[in-house]
């Protein structure tokens, strides 16, 4: 199957990719058919389209699939890890978020044979995963992302405000509470990524490749050093590769 559009239905947004020579992507509201129609008009896409959809939010993906079918388009819903062109070296592959596995599919296609990889996806949660020398997904770690960490500080304390954690990050020592929260949350996420990537890299005598994706990837890349390749559309690439591998 060669998709016209790939869609990644996340916890807060829906990301579409228009599959041309390269993926042209856009982030859209999860419950806004009028905006979806407007986006197709902006892309000047007409006629019957072929969609490949993947989701970590079943209700939202169901709404998107119904909307696509009402348009008269063909849609393939990716909801089974066994459809992926990827070996998963875990006891329960079905319990792994399929977005993590799709990132691995895309990296497997990009990395040189025999080279392991560390894959960081920085969204609502941050995942740090390991792709071994054979190109198999071996698991990793998960911890709260920038917005989730800031939200939890506000929700579970009496006096801390809700802050937005966006560069430029206040320098240390921060001189007020919001600035201290912004610096603390950003520093915790960066340090978490650095610590976990170093631990995973120690699993192989070969130097791994490092990939960074996710909604907060552009906010973080400047603090993570040049070893990371920034790939904002990694999950969409994984959906496209998987769809093209289907009969």
Image (cartoon, rainbow, N blue to C red):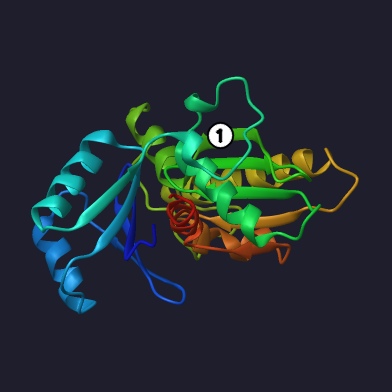
Q: Residue furthest front?
A: 247
Is residue 56 among the parts visible in the rendering?
yes
Q: Residue at x 24, y 77 (%)?
A: 43
Q: How many marks?
A: 1
Quadrant of the image containing the N terminus: bottom left
**Element marked by disc 1:** strand
Q: Residue at x 83, y 38 (%)?
A: 203
Query: Residue 146: horizontal and vertical position, in percent?
Result: 46, 46
Q: Is residue 9 left or right of residue 40?
A: right
Q: Is residue 200 left or right of residue 167?
A: right
Relative depth, front residue between 140 and 215: 140
Question: Vertical placement of 197 versus 26: above or below?
Answer: above
Relative depth, front residue between 205 and 13: 205
Is residue 162 among the parts visible in the rendering?
no
* Crowdedness near tag 1: few (<14), some (14–19) or many (≥20) residues, C-alpha within 10 Å: some
- The answer to which image quadrant residue 192 occupies is top right
Q: Residue furthest right?
A: 205
Q: Residue at x 15, y 49 (%)?
A: 31
Relative depth, front residue between 186 and 122: 122
The residue under label 1 is 142
Q: Residue furthest top?
A: 91
Q: Is residue 151 left or right of residue 121?
A: left
Query: Residue 244: horizontal and vertical position, in percent?
Result: 45, 57
Q: Is residue 133 left or right of residue 245?
A: right
Query: Residue 46: horizontal and vertical position, in percent?
Result: 16, 74
- The answer to which image quadrant residue 224 occupies is bottom right
Q: Residue at x 20, y 77 (%)?
A: 42
Relative depth, front residue between 95 and 173: 95
């Amino acid at each position: 199957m060669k998709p016209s559009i790939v869609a990644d239905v996340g916890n807060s947004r829906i990301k579409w990719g228009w599959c041309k020579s390269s993926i042209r992507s856009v982030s859209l509201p999860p419950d806004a058919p009028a905006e979806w129609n407007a986006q197709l008009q902006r892309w000047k896409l007409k006629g019957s389209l072929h969609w490949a959809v993947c989701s970590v939010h079943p209700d939202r993906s169901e709404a998107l699939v119904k909307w696509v079918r009402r348009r008269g388009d063909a849609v393939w819903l990716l909801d089974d890890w066994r459809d992926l062109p990827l070996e998963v070296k875990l006891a329960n592959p079905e319990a792994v978020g399929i977005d993590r596995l799709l990132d691995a599919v895309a990296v497997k296609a990009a990395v040189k044979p025999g080279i392991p990889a560390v894959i960081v996806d920085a969204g609502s949660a941050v995942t740090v995963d390991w792709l071994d020398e054979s190109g198999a997904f071996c698991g990793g770690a998960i911890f709260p992302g920038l917005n989730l960490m800031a939200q939890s500080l506000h929700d579970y304390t009496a006096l801390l405000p809700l802050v937005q954690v966006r560069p430029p990050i206040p320098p240390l020592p921060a001189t007020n509470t919001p600035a201290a929260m912004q610096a603390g949350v950003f520093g915790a996420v960066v340090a978490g990524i650095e610590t976990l990537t170093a631990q995973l890299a120690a699993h192989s005598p070969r130097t791994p490749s490092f990939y960074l994706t996710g909604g907060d990837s552009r906010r973080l890349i400047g603090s993570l050093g040049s070893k990371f390749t920034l790939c904002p559309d990694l999950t969409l690439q994984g959906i496209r590769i998987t769809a093209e591998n289907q009969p």
